[in-house]
Image (cartoon, grey):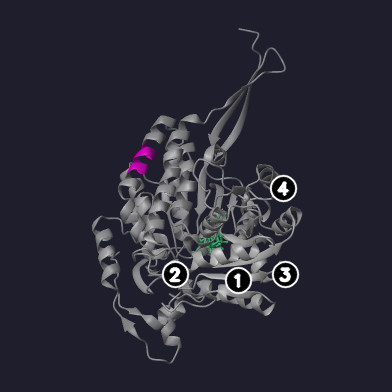
Amino acid sequence: MAVSFAAVNLRTMALRSSSKLLRRSSHLLPPIHMQHSAPPLTRKISMNARSIASQLNRSGLLKTQGLIGGKWSDSYDGKTIQVYNPATGESIADVACMGGKETNDAIASAYDAYRSWSKTTAAERSKLLRKWYDLLMAHKEELAQLMTLEQGKPLKEAMGEVNYGAGFIEFSAEEAKRIYGDIIPAPMSDRRLFVLKQPVGVVGAITPWNFPLAMITRKVGPALACGCTVVIKPSELTPLTALAAAELAIQAGIPAGAVNVVMGNAPEIGDALLASPQVRKITFTGSTAVGKKLMAGSAETVKKVSLELGGNAPCIIFDDADIDIAVKGTLAAKYRNSGQTCVCANRILVQEGIYDKFAKALIDAVRNMKVGDGFGEDVVQGPLINEAAVKKVETLLQDATSKGAKVMLGGKRHSLGFTFYEPTVVGDVNSDMRISREEVFGPVAPLLRFKTEEDAIRIANDTNAGLGSYVFTNSIQRSWRVAEALEYGLVGINEGVISTEVAPFGGFKQSGLGREGSKYGMDEYLEIKYVCLGNMKKE
Ligand code: NAP
């Protein structure tokens, strides 16, 4: 399939992201601009994006087809879906828009490949994973550019994601050799009891747009290391990074069918993965609503399920915190990826004695953050992913201010237009406002005041979510007390960025099931088999 650098209809662009559903089915409807009477405005793709895209195309990393059984494939009915640059609204490429049929073929090829891949030695799998890691790192800049182009995050942050994402492949290469079983002392002298760990089988991996590489490698690395094969479904908003990573997996020598990629019609692809008895595990990162559907849908064939879902992270600043460390940590925890991560601080709880001083220091720091196209120099805040994301921020902010919250900085769309939003600080927020109960997923820091340590813990735990949390204090005793009391899978103490491939990542309550990364993340792709050898006495 040719990569299209079509002229872009700006009016279409303004409307295209207002609803995922609308875009997903846009190939079935007349073009969106034709549904409106205003004359369309057009402009060509910028030279910057065009030259990056052509460079990627030349290096063979700009893939637009799905990957089934080791072959790049168009969708069977020829439908495509456009991928856009959220910073400019320009079209980057048309990619195959796949559905149930392609997914079933991808499952069949993964099932076929499983027979041989699961029989390879740990050392063989480790070598190939290591090679994949080396290729990801060798193409770090191109992958980062691709990510900035389709997701909007600043290039420096995108480079950081390549390091982080590739790290899961490197860690899995090492850990492949350490999938040990057990020998259990038998209760009877004529028996020997063993525990074997075996791959679970074919894995369906569904991932979101906010970390287009790392959310994939975090699943595929351990799956392959354990001897599983995978069908990946990246987000329709950011499939290009996933496809480039899959191309590098092929170049690394990972056999045909072990890694498959399908994208397009998410419900159809999801349904095919759920319905197949050959798919033995679903691993999902995304919204809690979709995660619940996948969990329910897995019941029919009793699949193993791992879910990394939404958060509502509290960031607690105690009176005794070092204010510079607290501001630096809060900036990182709140504004990374323009506030679009599942572990972004969603509620900043500030003790009353330090509230005014902290708010002023935070505002001063936020004011200095440069907003712009992720390729721009010194830019630390890119655009939001789409119009729906901006609307959500506006709705939650409007709800908060109507109930007494005060905008202290920002609070509106950025003059750059498109989906840029001003980095915002809003004070006098309370727990009844929607902004405290839902993920804002944008560059808005809501400040809530609290009196005592008990208050902070109660407010922090008053949510169905339980993923990331942060505590800023200079008291060792308090940091232990609060870390133990928080009902969260991750706690950062005096630190705003804590994710790493070597530590377990995952949520309590409705933030998910299972863990990714570290030795614990390997268990998600393994079955435990107990073997009893009896009658030892007689020869
Ligand atoms: P989303 O709408 O749930 O989408 C996630 C993935 O699921 C996408 O690939 C999406 O496809 C797909 N999908 C949607 N409906 C589906 C269906 N019926 N069947 C199968 N797949 C389906 O979430 P998002 O908006 O992309 O991501 C943001 C959310 O992810 C936030 O809530 C965030 O907190 C969470 N998140 C969690 C973690 C974590 O580790 N806990 C990490 C990152 C993000 P399309 O995009 O193609 O529609």
Is disc 4 in contact with disc 1, using a CB cutoff of under 8 Å? no
Is tag 4's residue or tag 3's residue first in the polypeptide sequence? 3
Q: Secondary structure at mark 4?
A: helix
Residue situated in front as seen by the camera: 403 or 117: 403
Q: Which mark is residue 383?
A: 2
Dot in front, 4 or 2: 4
Left or right of 520 on screen, residue 94: left
Q: In the figure, 192 relative to 112: above or below?
A: above
Residue topped by disc 1: 426
Is disc 1 in contact with disc 2, using a CB cutoff of under 8 Å? no
Q: Residues within 10 Å of mark 1 (few under 14, many from 20)?
A: many
- Residues under labels 4 and 1: Cα distance? 27 Å
Q: Residue at x 42, y 69 (%)?
A: 371
Residue situated in front as seen by the camera: 293 or 368: 368
Is residue 433 visible in the rendered image? The answer is yes
Is tag 4's residue or tag 1's residue first in the polypeptide sequence? 1
- Indicate the quadrant containing the C terminus: top left, top right, bottom left or bottom right: top right
Q: Amino acid at mark 3?
A: Asp
Q: Position of residue 352 (x, y in %)?
A: 69, 62
Residue topped by disc 4: 485
Left or right of 188 on screen, residue 47: left
Dot in front, 4 or 1: 1
Q: In the figure, 306 relative to 176: above or below?
A: below
Is tag 3's residue or tag 2's residue first in the polypeptide sequence? 2
Q: Position of residue 537 (x, y in %)?
A: 66, 8
Which residue range is magenta in the image? Answer: 128-134
Q: Residue at x 72, y 18 (%)?
A: 187
* The quarter of the displayed image where residue 396 is located: bottom right
Is disc 3 in contact with disc 2, using a CB cutoff of under 8 Å? no
- Residues under labels 1 and 3: Cα distance? 15 Å
Residue topped by disc 3: 432
Q: Position of residue 255 (x, y in %)?
A: 36, 42
